[in-house]
Amino acid sequence: MSRLALHDLIDRIPEEELPVAKRFLEYLAASPAYRAALSAPPDDEPVSEADAAAIVRVREELRTGKVVSQDDFLREFGLR
């Protein structure tokens, strides 16, 4: 199987099926760790009151723009 053969198959997929094909190809192209995480059972650990409060706080910080970019964070700790 070559990439050219795959391109030919993609060209033959009906237009309405392209979103499904895209999702499957993205799944195949993802790292093994990501694929394992996708197939892992859901987390069934209960959310503590402290966890719930932290989730509310972080959502509010995101909503109001009180966030630090990853680049700024890395620079602050000398990692960039």
Image (cartoon, rainbow, N blue to C red):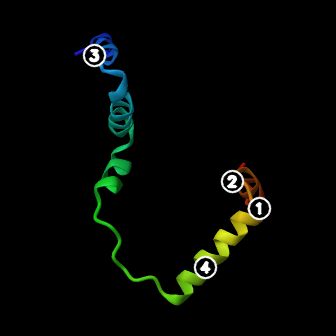
From the image, tell me which residue sits under label 2. 70
User: What type is the residue that disc 1 sits on?
Assistant: Gly
In the image, what residue occupies the spot 32% across and 15% down?
3
Tell which of 80 and 30 is nearer to you. Answer: 30
The first of marks 3 and 4 along the sequence is 3
- Residue visible at 33% across and 48% down in the picture: 35
Decide: few, some or many residues near mark 3? Use Cα within 10 Å; few <14, some 14-19, many ≥20: few
Are there few (<14), some (14-19), or many (20+) residues within 10 Å of tag 4?
few
Residue 21 sits in which quadrant?
top left
Q: Secondary structure at mark 4?
A: helix
Residue type, label 2: Gln
Residue 46: quadrant of the picture = bottom left
Q: Which quadrant of the structure image shows residue 52?
A: bottom right
Position of 40 compared to 60: left or right? left
Q: Earlier in the sequence, mark 1 or mark 4?
A: 4
Front label number (2 vs 3): 3
Give SS at disc 1: loop
- Marks 3 and 1 sit apart, C-alpha to C-alpha, by 45 Å
Q: Nearer the viewer, residue 74 or 45?
A: 45
Name the spot of residue 74 as percent of width and height, x first.
71, 55
Q: Which residue is label 4 attached to?
A: 54
Question: Does the CB distance between marks 2 and 1 fall below 8 Å?
Answer: no
Kindly report the distance in space between the C-alpha atoms of the residues bearing marks 3 and 4. Answer: 48 Å
Residue 11 x/y as whole percent: 34, 14
Q: Which residue is mark 3?
A: 9
Disc 1: which residue: 65
Q: Going by the picture, which residue comes out furthest to the left?
A: 1
Please state the horizontal and vertical placement of residue 29, each as a whole percent of the image.
37, 35
Residue type highlighted by circle 4:
Ala
